[in-house]
Image (spheres, grey):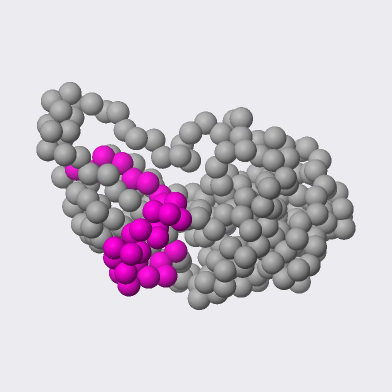
Amino acid sequence: MKKIVALIFILFGFTLFAQEKDIKKPEYVIIANNEIITKEKLNELDQQGWVKGMNKGVTEEERNKLAQKFGDKIGDREFIIKVEVLTEKEKLERENKNTTAIKVAPEEKNTDNELRLNINDPAIGFTVEMIDGQKKSLSDLKGKVVLLNYWATWCAPCLMEFAEFPEKILEPFKEDDFILIAISIGESKEKVAAKMDKMKKYGVNFNVGFDPKKEIWDQYATGGIPKSFLIDQKGIIRYISIGNSEGNVDKLAKEIKALLVK
């Protein structure tokens, strides 16, 4: 389980023990046995073999219930990590069986069938409304490199990725023929706008689109998010990013730069 705990934190864009990066990341809270715990306590539980599994994020309904219970201890934190702890009986059974079975994080599942478009495919055209009222059409962006990013307000790895975009992607390429189109899937304009307003405190202050019926998303992919499609100046998909593992945004930046110098 120790490897899985570390992996889950890496997939969020931070590690369990490493020093925080300069980029301010969205805040989180860890809950185990219906109580808020620290990263240090989680490490202790993991070292003792008590961690059964971890869920990255909760539904809006669950969040509201936890907010009622814990109040300001949860506050405006962007997401919640729920830790499943073994009972005494479960721990004994696990030790007796000496099992190596582990709970697989969602990002580790096979993603081969999650893509409807692949590298070297022409990107399918779309028009998306942005939260500021503008409409962006892919057909109008020929000649530009487009980073098409799919996300949602409840997706913790998506928000962690967003925190790195300003410094690593938007600022370096602001003078180039490049545009980021981040589209929230399955959510209303109001919900997306409210989340982006909260994200300003992390330096995340860019325009995003919304796809409430998932009509644009369904043409490109299925499964988990974040997913990003890097589209070249001729409208061809040249790179696809799935999930948000450590160094993911740096790889995106490298691929963008490579397309811009062609």
Q: Is residue 246 visible?
A: no
Find the magenta span and give its range. Answer: 50-78
Q: Nearer the viewer, residue 249 or 242?
A: 242
Indicate left or right for 185 with 158 as reference: right
The residue under the point 28% across, 55% down is: 31
Q: Quadrant of the C terminus?
A: bottom right
Q: Is residue 63 magenta-colored?
A: yes
Quadrant containing the N terminus is top left
Residue 85 x, y percent position in the rendering:
22, 44
Tell me the residue at 18%/26% (across/down).
98
**Spot occupied by residue 52 in the image (x, y as percentages of width and height):** 26, 40
Query: Which residue is at the front of the view, 229 or 221?
Result: 221
Q: Note whether residue 111 is visible.
A: yes
x, y percentage for residue 73?
30, 69
Above or below: residue 240 compared with residue 144: above
Report the residue that reaches farthest toward the top.
97
For residue 66, which quarter of the picture? Answer: bottom left
**The quarter of the displayed image where residue 70 is located:** bottom left
Please tell me which residue is depicted at 49% across the width and 60% down the height of the picture.
160
Tally of marks: 0
Magenta-colored stretch includes residue 67: yes
Q: Position of residue 112 (x, y in %)?
A: 59, 30
The residue lying at 18 percent from left, 52 percent from top is 44
